[in-house]
Image (spheres, grey):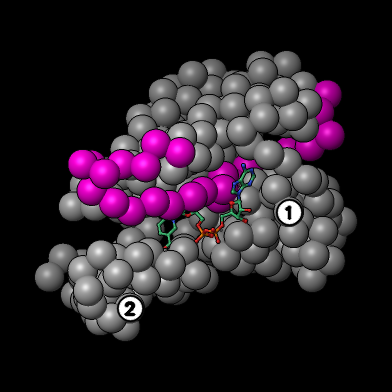
């Protein structure tokens, strides 16, 4: 029987490539997202695949989908690729944006972790959860306080969840990409450029030059690491934060 995996945020830029890589590897993928999950499912090779409309900020809906007896319960792996970004100095924090980012990046992950914990307690098994943090979850920088706080928090959450679900034979890890060539990074570059009175291209060039690679990370490079962690060949890893980025300058 093929390995079943749920990709939450599976219609996003990274999530949809993760779905494709997992499907190419022969896994049965459930694409879960606020919107766009059906379209991603229909484009996947192999199968059987499924799609699910899911709001991670709705705790009851998450438990109904991923908790014991849920529509997507009983999988062997889950990838949490839902996320949202916000940039701005602490002094002018937009509190609506703060709530949005924390609710999606952190509280949503808690909802998913709670549902998984309940399902794993009911059906102990080999299982791997992979949560998308960021290098911003490992070091802060000017203008990134809200996003970084959510991603630092996510790493703490993953370490605790991993310790709790180990007893069921299950694992949880975080993946921390650097600057990924993606619409989210381009939007960030546009916002930083406006704040600085610079051009978007200049900011993107600076982002690319943040490591000795002197380039952005490709989405596929992130997806391949996630696929390894979601698969059965990484059973010796749990509670870890895996960085997908170039070496320091
Ligand atoms: N793009 C980057 O440069 C980069 C770098 C490091 C980490 N990350 C992280 O990787 C993850 C994926 O990033 P991306 O570039 O694919 O972003 P994206 O914006 O393309 O995708 C995010 C997905 O999350 C979904 N989502 C948002 N709110 C949701 C909700 N309430 N319920 C369910 N789904 C919801 C969106 O619909 C979207 O499909 C995010 O957590 C992001 O913070 C991205």
Give the x, y percent position of residue 210. 21, 70
Please give left or right for residue 214 compared with residue 99 in the image. left
Disc 1, ligand 1: is the CB inside 8 Å?
A: yes
What residue appears at the point 43 percent right and 67 percent down from the top-left corner? 187
Residue 228, placed above or below residue 115: below
Residue 101 position, x and y percent, is 46, 42
Residue 104 in view in this figure: yes
The residue drawn where x is 75% and y is 64% is 40
Q: Is residue 120 left or right of residue 46?
A: left
Which residue sits at x=51%, y=48%? 83
Q: Indicate which disc residue 200 carries.
A: 2
Position of residue 16 relative to residue 212, above or below, is above
Q: Residue furthest left?
A: 249
Magenta stretch in the rendered image: 69-96
Query: Is the C-beta of the residue carrying label 2 under 8 Å from the nearest atom of ligand 1?
Result: no
Q: Which of the two residues, 79 or 74, is positioned nearer the viewer here?
A: 79
Dot placed on the residue nearer the N-terminal end, 2 or 1: 1
What residue sits right under mark 1 in the picture? Answer: 35
- In magenta segment, residue 135: no
- Examine the rendering and report whether any part of residue 238 can be seen: no
Q: Name the image quarter holding the C terminus.
A: bottom left
């Amino acid at each position: 029987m093929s390995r079943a995996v749920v990709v939450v945020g599976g219609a996003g830029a990274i999530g949809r490539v993760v779905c494709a890589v997992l499907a190419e590897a022969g896994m049965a993928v459930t694409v879960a997202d606020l919107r766009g999950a059906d379209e991603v499912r229909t484009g996947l090779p192999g199968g059987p695949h499924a799609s699910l409309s899911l709001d991670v900020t709705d705790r009851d809906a998450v438990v109904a989908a991923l908790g014991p007896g849920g529509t997507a319960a009983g999988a062997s792996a889950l990838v949490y690729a839902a996320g949202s970004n916000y940039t701005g100095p602490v002094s002018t924090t937009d509190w609506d944006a703060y709530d949005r980012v924390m609710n999606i990046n952190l509280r949503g992950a808690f909802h998913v972790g709670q549902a998984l914990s309940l399902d794993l307690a009911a059906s102990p098994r080999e299982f791997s959860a992979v949560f998308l943090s960021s290098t911003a979850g490992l070091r802060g920088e000017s203008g990134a306080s809200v996003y970084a706080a959510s991603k630092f928090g996510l790493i703490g959450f993953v370490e605790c969840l991993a310790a709790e679900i180990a007893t069921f034979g299950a694992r949880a890890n975080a993946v921390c990409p650097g600057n990924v060539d993606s619409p989210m990074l381009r939007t960030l570059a546009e916002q930083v450029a406006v704040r600085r009175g610079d051009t978007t291209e200049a900011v993107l060039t600076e982002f690319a030059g943040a490591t000795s690679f002197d380039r952005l990370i490709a989405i596929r490079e992130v997806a391949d690491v996630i696929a390894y962690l979601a698969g059965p060949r990484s059973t010796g890893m749990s509670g870890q934060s895996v960085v997908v980025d170039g070496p320091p300058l």
